[in-house]
Amino acid sequence: MTTEPIIRVEDVFAGYEGNAIQEHVTFDIAPGEVFGILGGSGCGKSTLMKHMIGLNPPVSGRILIGGDDIVTAEGEVLERIRRRFGVMYQSGALFGSMTLLENVRLPLEVYTDLPDDAIDLVARMKLELVGLEGFTGHLPAELSGGMQKRAGIARAMALDPSILFLDEPSSGLDPITAASLDATIRRLADSLGVTFVIVTHDLGSIFVATDRVILLDRHAKGIIAEGDPRKLRDESDDPRVRAFFRREAEIATA
């Protein structure tokens, strides 16, 4: 039985104001998949994610989330699409004057009619899922970078979305903290069945957390590889792919 993709990107030209950084980008993401968007600096990874969450429209193309095109959606349709996903930005984007519990409560207060005690319970449950149940009263500044990222994931999960977008989740973390965060992402994906879309260039995260990836290249302005990252690393005949996965310096050509 064929499962319909939860996200379908069709012939997207990614960029701004008519300037395409990536061209003819097409791929599908299956429900429950941990999907990585990879590439070197300046290749357009974060730009593509911004298009996928409706923050900025692409130059052209379609981005279907649950069958609805977020590029052209407006009003109630756009709101319905946005309720299907949560986003954790690179910095965590927590409100510094609010405790962790208050940060996670906020989406529930804005978008639901739940009573206050139910909101409190749900927020505590989300923090428990990422191992922060003992830090509900702490401010973000009182936490480590890894804990702030976990709190950002908890807030992104507040409304029980079916998709979570994570922008460079391991950026700025030491290897041990990054590995712990990767394990948390993998556990959440396996236990909750949530689809993860992760923008990253961190090889440790790629091999531990993701099921499948695309690799963007800024020179080719497109996808140069797609599949299981372990197979791409070990079996690809493309020197650009091998260079990325083996951390080899880019060779300049005339």
Image (tube, rainbow, N blue to C red):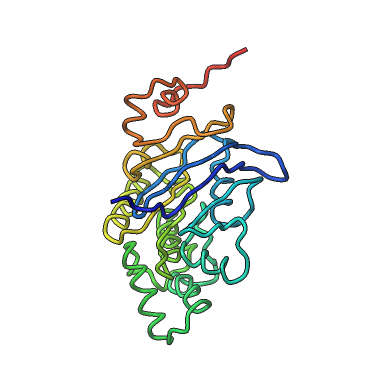
Outermost residue, front side? 1
Q: How many marks?
A: 0
- Tell whether 49 sits left or right of 207: right
Instruction: Look at the picture and state if 195 lies above or below 241.
Output: below
Quarter-of-image position of residue 175: top left
Residue at position x 38%, y 53% from top?
4
Quarter-of-image position of residue 129: bottom left
Q: Position of residue 165 (x, y in %)?
A: 46, 54
Q: Position of residue 43 (x, y in %)?
A: 57, 35
Residue at position x 54%, y 66% from top?
96
Which quadrant is home to the C terminus? top right
- Tell whether 168 sits left or right of 15: left
Instruction: Look at the picture and state if 214 lies above or below 145.
Output: above
Outermost residue, top side? 254
Residue in front for this viewpoint, 140 or 36:
36
- Tell whether 192 sits left or right of 170: left
Residue in front for this viewpoint, 137 or 165:
165
Q: Position of residue 189 (x, y in %)?
A: 32, 55
Instruction: Look at the picture and state if 141 lies above or below 176.
Output: below
Q: Position of residue 252 (x, y in %)?
A: 57, 16
Instruction: Look at the picture and state if 152 lies above or below 47.
Output: below
Residue at position x 52%, y 60% from top?
68
